[in-house]
Image (spheres, helix red, strand yellow):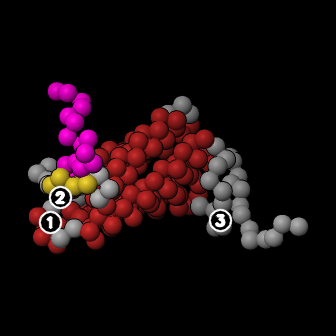
């Protein structure tokens, strides 16, 4: 199998979600691209996390989240089947509930440690994927959504939304586990 097909040289590509060729600038193609970015940054975050044995629980969570986003993509593809379920949403919520105890009740900067910072980047990209998901949904005909099973669309939207919530609490939990105080931000003028 060749990696290059030359099919996209003129600015269009096959979009598995709609089952048609679309311009590469189409919102659904953009969503698939940002979903790929989200999977990549989660892979980076879990790889960096794996360098710190004391963060192994987060390494496993991050790897499982990357796997889950792949399954979201598979589920939205034409003919791939249902690779996600309500159990995935419940798994994310259970982890959010467990990690929420580490939350700092104020606005904080996203750094402090390379793993926490990479989780923050992952959160931002997953949020963007969620926005692009809705732009894709709004741009296509309702018949295409019905063909792609409305329940999968609803599940995918909930998984994307909850994933970014989990990543948000995870970055705080990582700092707490490493005994690093997050830097809080206050609204004040520079003197």
Q: State if disc 2 and disc 1 touch (CB < 8 Å).
A: yes
Which mark is first along the chain, 2 or 1?
A: 2
Q: Which mark is residue 144?
A: 1
Q: Which residues are magenta?
A: 1-18
Give the distance between the C-alpha atoms of the residues marked 3 and 2, in whole angstroms: 39 Å
Q: Residue at x 39, y 57 (%)?
A: 129
> Could you tell me which secondary element the residue under label 3 belongs to?
loop
Binning the other alpha carbons within 10 Å of mark 1 as few (below 14), some (14 to 19) or many (20 upward) gives some
Vertical position of residue 37 compared to residue 188: above or below: above
User: Is 163 on the left-hand or right-hand side of 101?
Assistant: left
Vertical position of residue 67 compared to residue 189: above or below: above
Residue that label 2 marks: 18
Q: Nearer the viewer, mark 3 or mark 2?
A: 2
Residue 16 location in percent, x, y? 19, 51
Which mark is first along the chain, 1 or 3?
A: 3
Residue 22 location in percent, x, y? 22, 55
> Could you tell me which secondary element the residue under label 1 belongs to?
helix
Residue 122 location in percent, x, y? 48, 50
Which mark is first along the chain, 2 or 3?
A: 2
On-image quarter of the C terminus = bottom right
| Closer to us: 89 or 189 | 189
Residue that label 3 marks: 107
Q: Residue at x 27, y 48 (%)?
A: 11
Residue 127 location in percent, x, y? 44, 60
Magenta segment, principal secondary structure? Answer: loop
Q: Residue at x 43, y 44 (%)?
A: 42
On-image quarter of the N terminus = top left
| Closer to us: 88 or 74 | 74
User: Does the segment drawn in magenta span residue 2?
Assistant: yes
User: Does the segment drawn in magenta span residue 8?
Assistant: yes
Binning the other alpha carbons within 10 Å of mark 2 as few (below 14), some (14 to 19) or many (20 upward) gives many
């Amino acid at each position: 199998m060749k990696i290059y097909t030359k099919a996209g040289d003129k600015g269009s590509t096959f979009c598995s979600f709609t089952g048609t060729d679309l311009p590469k600038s189409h919102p659904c193609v953009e969503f698939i691209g940002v979903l790929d970015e989200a999977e990549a940054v989660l892979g980076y975050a879990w790889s960096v996390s794996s360098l710190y044995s004391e963060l192994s629980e987060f390494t496993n969570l991050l790897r499982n989240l990357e796997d889950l986003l792949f399954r979201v993509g598979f589920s939205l593809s034409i003919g791939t089947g249902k690779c996600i379920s309500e159990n995935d949403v419940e798994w994310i919520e259970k982890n959010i509930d467990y990690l929420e105890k580490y939350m700092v009740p104020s606005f904080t900067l996203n750094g402090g440690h390379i793993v926490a910072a990479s989780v923050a980047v992952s959160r931002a990209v997953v949020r963007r994927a969620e926005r692009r998901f809705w732009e894709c949904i709004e741009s296509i005909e309702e018949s295409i959504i019905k063909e792609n099973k409305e329940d999968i669309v609803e599940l995918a939207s909930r998984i994307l939304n909850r994933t970014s919530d989990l990543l948000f609490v995870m970055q705080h939990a990582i700092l707490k586990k490493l005994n690093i105080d997050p830097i809080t931000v206050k609204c004040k003028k520079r003197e």
